[in-house]
Amino acid sequence: FSSSRSGMERASSSAVLIENEENEEREGFFSRFLNFIGKSEENDEENFSDVKPVPFLDLFRFASGKERMAIGVAIFLSIVMGMCTPAHIYLTGVITTALVDVKEPVDNIDFLHHIWQLSSLYAAFFIFTFVVGYIENWMHVWASERIAQRLSTSASAAVVRLSEESNGISEEAILNLKAVASCNGEKTMIQRYASSLLSSIAPSTRCGFFTALYYATASLVHIVFHTAGSWYGTIRYHSGSIEHAGVVFAVVNIAIGSASSFTMLGPHLLAVVKARVAAAKVYHTIDSQEDAEEKVQTSLDPTNAEMHLALDNVSFTFPGRSLPAVQQLSFDLSPGESLALVGKSGCGKSTTLKLVTRFLSGYSGRILLDGQPFDLYDKKKWRRMVGVVSQEPSIFTGSIRDNICLGRPFTQVEVENACRIAYAHEFISELEEGYSTLLGPSGVSLSGGQKQRIAIARAIIANTRLLLLDEATSALDSRSERIVQEALDAASEGRTTIVVAHRLSTIKNVQRNTMNSGVVQMESSH
């Protein structure tokens, strides 16, 4: 029985191999070449293995009717330009023949009139081709710019992962230059940066190899045919088979010009190949986002909720870990109530906040908002209702006002009111530029307490209804901690608040949950 089973397995595997070979033959060389050029590395974060290059016409998916018409006119004008090229070469040959033909006198009126006619015709061709070429390029640029802008807007989340990762490593090393230098970590950071670029070497090498091979072959053929054509034409002219020397010049240059056109076509074909492969990945991401947006249209609106938040036996385990970060967590938070999660590092406090802000999914149990499942609510609208103040606030390069507004259309009065509640208006007013003071990367010109108060103002300016405080005072000295704590108390008034803390001294007037290893150990008021 085992021998017959192994024979059946060998037969089935052989059939699979034969079927794969037949599929490869049906795909053809060009399809295999497309897959080879666009082949992704095995360690890509996103799985695009099932994504195939899109058809050529799908590259114009984001083009409007006017843009497609402009591209069509530009292609037609390109054809006209190509048809004018032999005429240019022919006229050049005729003029050359007239100048070197010693059989005709060169000082009579007829000769000068003939040269003037040819020169005028050549000038007219020049003006015509210049105008056509200008219009063609203008239409190409106009349509391409609009399509690229629309595509980048639709695929804003589909950034280039490799360059983003490399830039993140270099930025991290520069911002932490002192720590890197003090620990002699320069070589380590350089190795990390170099390794992040290694994954792009293989596809770049493949594309570079085929491009170089194409150009080398085309140049070789170009030189060989130019030499052979000139040699053969000279022999035929001296033997009398060709009457005018300009014919040799015209024929050789027309042939070489046509070959050059095919040579210039190569990079454009390779660009189309790359575009089809890249468009498949970008369109895959865009379609996924559109599917998510369609689901959002049927979601509930959290802005009408009363903010009754409840967690019922919620557990969450990070991928690749065996122990849960949160285990059977339950609490009930009424509107306007404050809740504190107290415990040592790694017990699941910050993970709970990420679950509440919906930055983590795949949990077990139930999270309810006004008795409805949490996932039924619109994610984007929910996050607009949540303000977060973390231990290390994010400060961006720009003015203080820009850091508080983050592109949202708030008035100066609203900004100042939020800063007064956050106890930040006083120190901002003492600055020379006030709210227009420019901050460097990560707010290097501000103290820890000042950055925290700006983060508090940012969290409350949008009139958020849920405030999450993730160890907001743990990294401050006693004086700054007192000021920031007063700001947090003022910001928490009238808002549902969840506080994460290590020490009981940093919280007051809250319902407290003491956590350990992702499990609530004790509940009490403080």
Image (spheres, rainbow, N blue to C red):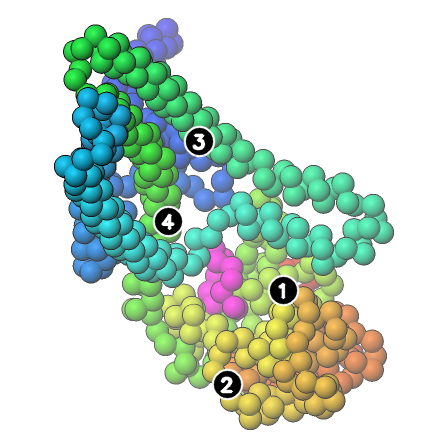
Of discs 4 and 3, which sits in the foreground? 3
Q: Is residue 362 visible?
A: yes
For label 2, the residue is: 410
Q: Quadrant of residue 227?
A: top left
Q: Which residue is mark 3?
A: 207
Q: Nearer the viewer, mark 4 or mark 1?
A: 4
**Callouts 2 and 1 close, C-beta under 8 Å:** no
Q: Is residue 210 left or right of residue 333?
A: left
The residue drawn where x is 25% and y is 30% is 99
* Dot 4 or dot 3, earlier in sequence: 3
Crowding around mark 2 (Cα neighbors within 10 Å: few <14, some 14 to 19, many 20+) is some
* Residue underneath mark 1: 350
Q: Which residues are magenta?
A: 356-367
Is residue 38 positioned above or below 153 on the image?
Answer: above
Q: From the viewer's perspective, is residue 483 above or below residue 89?
A: below
Q: Name the amino acid, label 3.
A: Cys
Of the numbered discs 3 and 1, the one sitting upstream in the chain is: 3
Q: How many marks?
A: 4
Q: Who is closer to the viewer here, 235 or 51?
A: 235
Q: Is residue 84 visible?
A: no
> Residue at coordinates 28% horizontally, 41% vertically from top-left?
54
What is the residue that sits farthest to the left in this orientation?
110
Under circle 2, the secondary element is loop
- At a point 60% along the width and 62% down the height, the residue shown is 351
**Alpha carbon of mark 4 to alpha carbon of mark 3: how far?**
20 Å
Left or right placement of residue 359 versus residue 133 in this view: right
Q: Is residue 436 above or below residue 225?
A: below
